[in-house]
Image: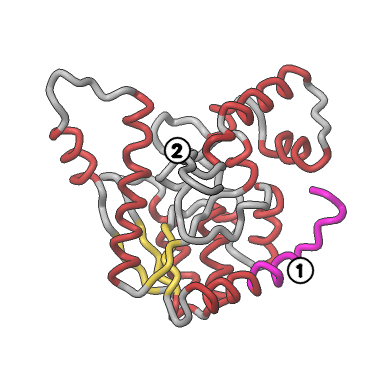
Amino acid sequence: MSDNFDVKKVTEDVVKWIQDFFENNGKGCNAIVGVSGGKDSSVTAALLVKALGKDRVIGVLMPNGEQSDIEYAQLLVEYLGIKNYTVNIKAAVDGLKSALPQDMELSNQANVNLPPRIRMSTLYAVSQSNNGRVVNTCNLSEDWVGYSTRYGDAAGDFSPLAHLTVTEVKEIGRYLELPDCLVDKKPSDGLCGKTDEDNLGFTYAVLDKYIRTGVCEDEETKKNIDARHAANLFKLALMPAFMYGDK
């Protein structure tokens, strides 16, 4: 982590930013957060509680059938004392798959991305039924290398962590005194049995250092990061649109 990272000031600034967002984009609305039990959703939920109070934060647990680590999500909502719903998305996922034409085989990437997109639909259904605004929980490190699902976990109405690295998010989690098991839980897609870092081929510590300082000692790792970043920049841009008439 950079020596310039002032966790106290950044936390206070994020809390104020959240308060300003709701003042200008939904005064009195509730914050709706998908809770996985990982660091990002945990830190985001804790920041929302600090900014708005626990009575205006609603957590949504969305297992896809059996979720082996759902106890972490349950621990978070109990620790923060926030209202929460559990919506099992398995029937929706299976229903969509079964509705596809028999002569169309779902690609592996479509299969991986389907649950996150159904989870985002779930969050908006909860949000629109509870006077809510949906929070995006992605961080800068994952966005940098495209480790998110477009219109899935990459969607939302506002994004408190989008400019903070994994290392910095963890620092905020510790500053907010979240349980260590939530802050340090190894991120995983829950599908292949591997961690995100296993799939990426480098650690978030290495990635975060490269993002903040431009330094990456291993040339092959640097090429890997640069290639992933270039290939996924489209996820962070506004949708291209044909300009008609005066620009």
Q: How far apart are the alpha carbons under marks 2 and 1? A: 30 Å
Q: Mark 2: which amino acid?
A: Asp
Classify 10 Å Cα crowding around label 1: few (below 14), some (14-19), many (20 and above): few
Q: Position of residue 85 (x, y in %)?
A: 31, 65
Tag of residue 199? none
Q: Tell which of 76 and 162 is nearer to you.
A: 162
Q: Residue at x 32, y 30 (%)?
A: 111
Q: Quadrant of residue 232?
A: top right
Q: Quadrant of residue 171?
A: bottom right
- Give the main secondary structure of the magenta stretch: helix
Q: Which is nearer the N-term, disc 2 or disc 1?
A: 1
Q: Residue at x 60, y 34 (%)?
A: 145
Q: Mark 1: which amino acid?
A: Lys
Residue 149 in the magenta stretch? The answer is no
Q: Position of residue 238 (x, y in %)?
A: 52, 44
Q: Secondary structure at mark 2?
A: loop
Q: Quadrant of residue 174?
A: bottom right
In the figure, is residue 160 to the left or right of 82?
Answer: right
Q: Residue at x 33, y 41 (%)?
A: 115
What residue sits right under mark 2 in the picture? 189
Determine whether label 2 and label 1 are within 8 Å by CB: no
Q: Position of residue 217 (x, y in %)?
A: 82, 25
What's the magenta region? 1-15
What residue sits right under mark 1 in the picture? 8
Q: Residue at x 76, y 63 (%)?
A: 7
Q: Position of residue 241 (x, y in %)?
A: 46, 41
Q: Secondary structure at mark 1?
A: helix
Residue 7 in the magenta stretch? The answer is yes
